[in-house]
Amino acid sequence: MPTQRPSTIRHRTALFEDAVAIVREEYAAELSLDDIARRVASSRRQLQRAYAEIGDTTFREHLTRVRMNRAAELLNTRGLTVREVAHRVGYRQPAQFAKAFRRHLGVAPSTYRANGNGHAAGSGELADLLRGAPDGAPARSARFSRFPAVAVGFTARSDAA
């Protein structure tokens, strides 16, 4: 991949940071890539590039990560049912939420709550996953550390390093 101009990197970083801020505040709403792109005055493709190159993720993966981490917090700290948690984090169907939660965290929401922080047998990695970075951002390798981290724990990606 060719080296990008600093202005391109700055622009994509700003787009990514703006999109992340919207997701952080409105994760429970029905959000789409097109909606976010309009709100940050960008094209869908430019925002996809910002997510891929700056966040090393996709919009959908990021939204799901934020929702699942918030769901885990709600399951730990409040007396809400799984159905109520599902609705609070943006899922209309509790079954769809439960499936996404299992896929993302490796245990069912009810098991996560029952075992306190999801420490079911064989889920020792779960706590590490949740502690990994703010908003569930995956840990980044050193090769992605050329640019400063943005507020949510993502770092810019550079293949030139």
Image: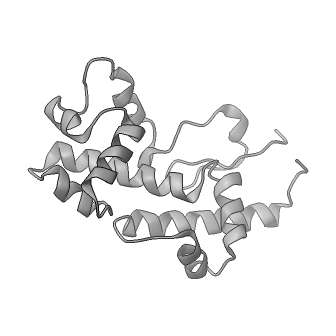
Percent x, y of residue 9: 76, 60
Q: Quadrant of the C terminus?
A: top right
The answer to whether residue 143 is left or right of residue 24 is right
Q: Is residue 1 above or below residue 142?
A: below
Q: Is residue 105 above or below residue 44?
A: above
The answer to whether residue 93 is left or right of residue 140 is left
Q: Viewer-proximal residue, 130 or 120?
A: 120
Q: Is residue 123 above or below residue 76?
A: above
Give the color scheme: rainbow, by chain, secondary structure or one colour.
one colour
Residue at x 64%, y 67% (from the top left corner): 14
Q: Is residue 118 visible?
A: yes
Percent x, y of residue 57: 60, 49
Furthest toward the left, the residue is: 79
Residue at x 54%, y 67% (from the top left corner): 19
Residue at x 45%, y 70% (from the top left corner): 31
Residue at x 41%, y 39% (from the top left corner): 103
Q: Is residue 33 above or below residue 123?
A: below
Percent x, y of residue 154: 57, 48
Q: Viewer-proximal residue, 22 or 43?
A: 43
Where residue 24 sits, quadrant-wise, is bottom left
Percent x, y of residue 78: 12, 50
The answer to whether residue 93 is left or right of residue 9 is left
Furthest toward the right, the residue is: 2
Count every numbered label the image shows and give the total: 0
Where residue 41 sits, quadrant-wise, is bottom right
The answer to whether residue 138 is left or right of residue 116 is right
Q: Is residue 151 visible?
A: no
